[in-house]
């Protein structure tokens, strides 16, 4: 959850115009922005995203380096006992639940989707452990279908930038879909990456670096600690 002290007042028309100003700047500032998780096919991406809950991307990448050598397909995750998978992913935390969700998703993908990770929001939401954040991440990154991934950085920055007053990721996602171009400047998927990279590099949770921020001219929270 975002820990802003209070929300910037929202004017949807102003927010839409602000997005059009900041998107090209972020695109230029972060030309190589992409998801920080390592993956090489939609199933591996789904596993990595499930593992990333309450865990750093660095830790997930360390774990998946070996995991993806041992388990290649959904069936591989069902060929071992749950306890063995739990030990293989233990250091990502919440490993029992994550192992259960990975195996549940593997089973559903084999039984209902012919062994292939589905490419629609509705189908992805039927997988154990997959909410809209996970589904958007898979759609946007593995299938090139526009989706806004509302993680903690996207929530915090959207509020500071006066794009939405919502902290709830699903409500925020719908607010953003209304004002962010679906395709232009990289569209919804890249918009998430840009905000995540900006949140990691400049607009940090505790101390945003407004003097170094390339979009400060358009940010209603610039140099306003009362709004951070
Ligand atoms: S001006 Fe400050 S608060 Fe606004 S986006 Fe930049 S770093 Fe964040």
Image (spheres, rainbow, N blue to C red):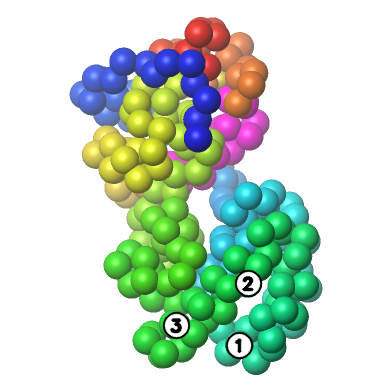
Q: Earlier in the sequence, mark 1 or mark 3?
A: 1
Disc 3 within 8 angstroms of ligand 1 (CB)? no
Q: Does residue 182 show up?
A: yes
Q: In the rendering, at what x and y percent does residue 43 appear? A: 54, 75
Q: Is residue 42 above or below residue 16?
A: below
Q: What residue is shown at x 44% (from left), y 82% (from top)?
A: 108
Q: Main secondary structure of the magenta part?
A: helix
Q: Earlier in the sequence, mark 3 or mark 2?
A: 2
Q: Does residue 119 show up?
A: no
Q: Crowdedness of circle 3 by 10 Å Cα count: few (<14), some, many (20+)?
A: many
The residue beneath circle 3 is: 109
Mark 1, secondary structure of its residue: helix
Give the number of the disc on residue 46: none
Task: Evaluate if marks 1 and 3 touch, with contact meaning CB atoms under 8 Å apart.
Answer: no
Give the number of the disc on residue 78: 1
Q: Earlier in the sequence, mark 1 or mark 2?
A: 1
Q: What residue is shown at x 52% (from left), y 17% (from top)?
A: 228
Q: In the rendering, at what x and y percent does residue 172 appear? A: 35, 38
Extent of the magenta region: 189-204
Quadrant in which residue 78 is drawn: bottom right
The verdict on residue 194 being magenta is yes
Please give left or right for residue 223 compared with residue 81 in the image.
Answer: left
Q: What residue is shown at x 45% (from left), y 63% (from top)?
A: 130
Q: Is residue 38 above or below residue 30?
A: below
Disc 1 within 8 angstroms of ligand 1 (CB)? no
């Amino acid at each position: 959850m975002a820990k802003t002290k209070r929300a910037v007042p929202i004017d949807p028309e102003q927010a839409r115009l602000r997005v059009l100003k900041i998107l090209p700047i972020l695109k230029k500032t972060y030309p190589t922005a992409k998801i920080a998780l390592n993956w090489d096919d939609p199933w591996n991406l789904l596993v990595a995203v499930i593992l990333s809950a309450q865990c750093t991307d660095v830790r997930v990448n360390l774990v998946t380096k070996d995991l993806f050598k041992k388990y290649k397909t959904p069936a591989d995750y069902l060929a071992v006992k749950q306890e063995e998978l739990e030990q293989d992913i233990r250091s990502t935390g919440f490993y029992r639940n994550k192992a259960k969700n990975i195996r549940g998703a593997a089973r559903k993908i084999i039984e209902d989707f012919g062994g292939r990770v589905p490419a629609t929001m509705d189908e992805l939401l039927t997988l154990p452990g997959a909410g809209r954040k996970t589904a958007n991440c898979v759609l946007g990154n593995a299938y090139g279908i526009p989706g806004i991934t509302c993680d903690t950085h996207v929530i915090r920055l959207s509020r500071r930038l006066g794009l939405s007053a919502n902290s709830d990721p699903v409500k925020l996602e719908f607010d953003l879909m209304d004002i962010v171009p679906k395709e232009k400047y990289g569209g919804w998927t890249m918009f998430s990456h840009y905000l995540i990279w900006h949140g990691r590099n400049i607009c940090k949770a505790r101390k945003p670096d407004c003097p170094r921020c390339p979009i400060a001219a358009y940010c209603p929270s610039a140099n306003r600690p009362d709004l951070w």
